[in-house]
């Protein structure tokens, strides 16, 4: 469980860890080990192991950090190597809890201050949701940095679960396809409570993770939650190169005009929209080409084999939004937002155009 400094989520991280301990208390640990990296402040962090003994859990401190550099390849690689040295294993999986903004790169320029753009985590008078990193750029990490750090460490995850907003994204999954078999994430904002580990935990810790049960546990929790809004999906990253090949063919034949963009299912509260439902984007892109769209839907059933959503998803800026089309994963391909201006630089765009 990798929980870097995320400004306003620390109390929720402690709750997430306690929920995972509750799941472990019910099932025990056999050959599994659970290592947690937790930032306790902006400048301090600790790595500890959740140890199950005599019917209860306790936390064994493995290492303490001062000013860990988790936003850089060098720093994150070192943290991952620490985890490997403390708990060498045949198989690994990773849970990342923090704020999230999909594939969007960390803003490097001060120009952000001159815009009237408001991020979803900046709304304070509404129910809170989660942003990969903290609320400010010095604590945010690019997905490409995560991917390279995992590669540097020689790690290939069974799954990476993002307990953050907007991380079930084609662009994110494509960047991570060589360092994880599966991506578990939310295509929309997730309420600040995060994943319900007390019920999901046993399926996440299983030798063969039960992805259908993971989605079902998420759905049941959020269907009955105080704020009954939640979306989740599991992506099989091994098939993304096949999808990229199909999308390159599709983009060579068809393109959208801005009048069509408005009818695609939005998956965020931003204006202009940044994250669109990927399946709905392709449906409209294909138009009347039923043969090509049929090939796409057949492949998507394999790429996103498990998904779930409540009737509406929540946004900090617009409140609840009805889900009419749902493929479980987003794209920013049709976005006109200034925040998506670097989209042509993504590896997904370059592979599909």
Image (spheres, helix red, strand yellow):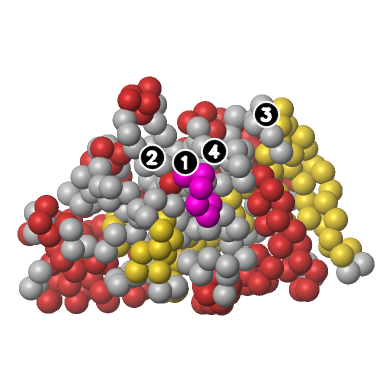
Provide the secondary structure element on which disc 2 rests.
Answer: loop
Q: Which residues are magenta?
A: 121-129
Which sits earlier in the primary sequence, circle 2 or circle 3? 3
Viewer-side label of 3, 1: 1
Asked if the residues shown at circle 2 and circle 1 are in contact, with their CB atoms under 8 angstroms apart, the answer is: yes
The residues bearing labels 2 and 1 have C-alpha atoms spaced at a distance of 6 Å
Q: Give the residue at mark 2.
A: 118
The residue at which mark 1 appears reads as 122
- Residue named by callout 3: 43
Q: Residue at x 68, y 39 (%)?
A: 39
Marks 2, 3: nearer the viewer: 2
Contact (Cβ within 8 Å) of mark 4 with mark 3: no
Residue at which label 4 appears: 134
Q: CA distance from mark 4 to mark 3?
A: 12 Å
Report the side of 37 relative to 267 (left or right): right
Image location (x, y in percent) of residue 303 = 36, 68
How crowded pointer 4 is (Cα within 10 Å; few <14, some 14-19, many 20+) is rated as many
What is the C-alpha distance between the residues marked 1 and 4?
12 Å
CB contact under 8 Å: marks 4 and 2: no
**Residue 80 at what x, y percent from top left?**
62, 42
Q: Which residue shows up at 36% across the image and 73% down it?
A: 302
């Amino acid at each position: 469980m990798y929980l870097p400094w995320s400004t306003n989520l620390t109390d929720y991280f402690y709750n997430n860890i306690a929920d995972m301990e509750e799941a472990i208390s019910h099932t025990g640990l056999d050959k599994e080990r659970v290592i947690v990296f937790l930032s306790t402040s902006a400048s301090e962090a600790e790595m500890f192991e959740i140890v199950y003994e005599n019917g209860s859990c306790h936390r064994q401190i493995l290492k303490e950090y001062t000013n860990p550099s988790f936003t850089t390849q060098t720093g994150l690689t070192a943290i991952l190597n620490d985890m490997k040295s403390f708990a060498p294993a045949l198989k690994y999986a990773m849970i990342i809890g923090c704020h999230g903004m999909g594939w969007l790169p960390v803003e490097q320029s001060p120009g952000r201050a001159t815009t009237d753009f408001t991020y979803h985590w900046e709304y304070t008078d509404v129910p809170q949701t989660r942003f990969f990193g903290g609320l400010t750029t010095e604590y945010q990490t690019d997905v490409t940095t995560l991917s390279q750090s995992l590669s540097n460490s020689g790690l290939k995850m069974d799954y990476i679960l993002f307990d953050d907003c907007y991380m079930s994204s084609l662009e994110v999954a494509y960047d991570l396809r060589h360092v994880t078999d599966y991506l578990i994430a939310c295509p929309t904002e997730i309420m600040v409570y995060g994943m319900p580990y007390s019920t999901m935990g046993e399926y996440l810790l299983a030798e063969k993770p039960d992805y259908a049960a993971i989605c079902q546990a998420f759905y049941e929790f959020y269907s009955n939650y105080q704020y009954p809004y939640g979306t989740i999906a599991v992506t099989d990253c091994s098939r993304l190169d096949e999808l990229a090949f199909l999308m390159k063919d599709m983009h060579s034949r068809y393109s959208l005009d801005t009048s069509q963009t408005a009818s695609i299912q939005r998956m965020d509260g931003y204006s202009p929209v940044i994250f669109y439902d990927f399946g709905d984007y392709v449906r409209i892109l294909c138009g009347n080409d039923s043969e090509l769209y049929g090939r796409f839907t057949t492949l998507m059933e394999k790429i996103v084999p498990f998904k779930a959503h409540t009737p509406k998803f929540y946004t900090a800026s617009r409140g609840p939004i009805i889900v009419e089309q749902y493929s479980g994963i987003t794209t920013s391909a049709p976005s006109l937002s200034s925040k998506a201006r670097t989209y042509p630089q993504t590896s997904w765009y370059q592979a599909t155009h």
